[in-house]
Amino acid sequence: MESAAAPAPAPARARLAKALRNLPALVAALLLVGAVALAIFAPFVAPHAPDAVNLARRLLPPGAAGDPLGTDPLGRDVLSRVLFGARISLLVGGVTMLVAGLIGTCAGLLAGYFPGAVDDILMRLGDIVLSFPFLLLALIVVAALGPSVRNLIIVLVLRSWITYGRVVRSQVVEMREVEFVEAARALGAGHVRILLKHVLPRVAGVAVVVASFNMAEAIVYEASLSFLGAGVPPPTATWGGMLHDNLLYIATAWWTIVFPAAALTLVILALNVLGDWIRDALDPNLRL
């Protein structure tokens, strides 16, 4: 009689568990890399210009010759518009993440390290911005400056830096009086050196986690504002704009809604999964 198979060694089980835990993050990272690559090379990958109108080919279903994802009510190729829409969404999300992250991290470092007037001014400024509903704030700014990619980024940065600032501030407050900071101060290190060499490296991981979720949030806001007509003006292809333009055709031409909505959903989902993985990877209690 054959003996039962021996159980897998503990190290092998640990490696398998770690690989399975990292698999969603790997898939999300590959999806994001693919989305960025398609956005960058959209002019070479897209079968048509995104704004090329051809009323003779309007509302063709997916699979039509030359238009693999069909066409919209103006005869524009849906695949081409989805690819070029990715450029706008990723550009807005990426620039917002970088600019808001830089401003918010600096504000959080200063507010946490210098209690009193500096902390009060920066945090109260954040409270003032948060007191306005975001869509109302966005509509006010767009009405004053006009709809454009630049103005949309300004609105999103104005809203997003506060999240970085508050999270980083909370971390800096905890380490302001710890031993290594006190030792550096006793050795004559200035405030700038302490912040850049000793404090910033220890809060950078938290800022990265915030950045991943902030980029997803910025893409959602961009799509929402474009859907409401307050984002990137037409005829520029955007995912939110495609949803707005084709909403009346959802029952008769589902492909004009489903494909841009699917692209938006996949990118947002990938960013959130990657953000969760980064957060778990930085948490020592969750490491195997």
Image (tube, rainbow, N blue to C red):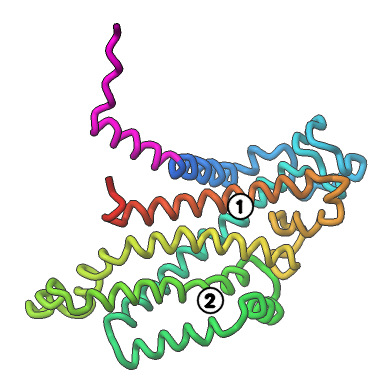
Q: Is residue 204 magenta?
A: no
Q: Residue 155: where, in percent of width, then height?
A: 59, 74
- Give the residue number, with chain letter if any, for mark 1: 87
Q: Residue at x 80, y 47 (%)?
A: 52
Secondary structure category for the residue under label 2: helix
Q: Please give the range of residues in magenta.
A: 1-23
Q: Residues within 10 Å of mark 2 (few under 14, many from 20)?
A: many
Secondary structure category for the residue under label 1: helix
Which residue, as the protein is rendered here, is positioned at the far bottom? Answer: 117
The relative height of residue 271 versus residue 11 in the rendered view (above or below) is: below
Q: Residue 257: where, in percent of width, then height?
A: 76, 49
Q: Residue at x 53, y 76 (%)?
A: 158
Instruction: Specify which label sits upstream in the sequence, 2 or 1.
Output: 1
In-front residue for pair 12/35: 12
Is 215 on the left or on the right of 61, as rendered? left
Name the chief secondary structure element in magenta: helix
In-front residue for pair 17/224: 17
Which residue, as the protein is rendered here, is positioned at the far top? Answer: 1
Q: Residue at x 50, y 71 (%)?
A: 160
- Give the residue number, with chain letter if any, for mark 2: 158
CA separation in Å, label 2 and label 1: 22 Å
Q: Is residue 14 magenta?
A: yes
